[in-house]
Amino acid sequence: MKRKRVVTALGILVAFLFVGGLAFAGAARRGYGGHGGGARVFGRIARQLDLTDDQRAQMRDVVHKHWLSGLGASADRARVARRDLRGLIQDPAADESAIRAASKSAAAADEELAVERHRTFADAAALLTPEQKDKLKALRQEWSERGDRIFGGIDGALKN
């Protein structure tokens, strides 16, 4: 039972982090990454920030430009590197050196993706009014607190 709670909590955490990362990346066109989840998240954030139609269009353009200029390729490399690492972790015949190498590869891909996401976010945030930036800051704080509750749940599950 304890293991099931840990796995469930980890699954929720991964989904939360993944969807948050795709909020802007998936907004340029429905279907980045093979689904429309990022577009739905973007729509919800756009409503919460009360973005104008012009701001929405500009944000889609910014994200699309970044997707084509490196964000998309970085996301693909990170996804593949994490999948490869996961495969090795779950392979009883894999040796530790292969897992370490795959882990370093995944970390490097995630690092590159983080920089691309930051560039995208910075360009998109520049389109916001001061009031919208304040609202975004409050939303990010709320999301952080939710994440803390998820981490707290994981920590509690691991300690019990």
Image (cartoon, grey):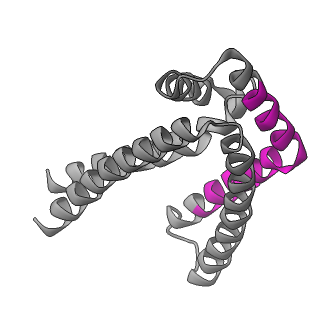
In the image, residue 36 sits, relative to residue 99, either above or below, namely: above
Q: Is residue 7 visible?
A: no
Rendering quarter of residue 42: top right
Of residues 9 and 90, the one nearer the viewer is 9
> Does residue 147 show up?
yes
- How many numbered badges does the structure rendering display? 0
In x, y percent, where is residue 76? 75, 48
- The percent position of residue 78, horizontal first and vertical second, equals 69, 56
- 139 with respect to 111 (left or right): left
Q: Is residue 92 left or right of residue 141?
A: right
User: Which quadrant of the structure image shows residue 100?
Assistant: bottom right
- Considering every residue shown, the one lying at the far left of the view is 160
Left or right: 2 as drawn, with respect to 139: left
Q: Residue furthest top?
A: 53
Q: Main secondary structure of the magenta part?
A: helix
For image coordinates 64% across by 70% down, the residue present is 107
Q: Residue at x 42, y 41 (%)?
A: 139
- Left or right: residue 2 versus residue 46 is left
| Magenta span contains residue 41 | no
Span shown in magenta: 58-85
What residue is rendered at 53% in x and 22% in y?
50
Q: Is residue 54 above or below residue 144?
A: above
Considering the image in quadrants, where does the C terminus appear?
bottom left
Picture coordinates of residue 145 (x, y %)? 30, 51
Residue placed most toward the observer, 95 or 134? 134
Q: Is residue 81 magenta?
A: yes
Q: Against 61, is 113 above or below?
A: below
Nearest the camera: 98 or 141?
A: 141
Please provide percent x and percent y for residue 64. Answer: 82, 33
| Residue shown at the point (22%, 49%) measured from the top left | 4
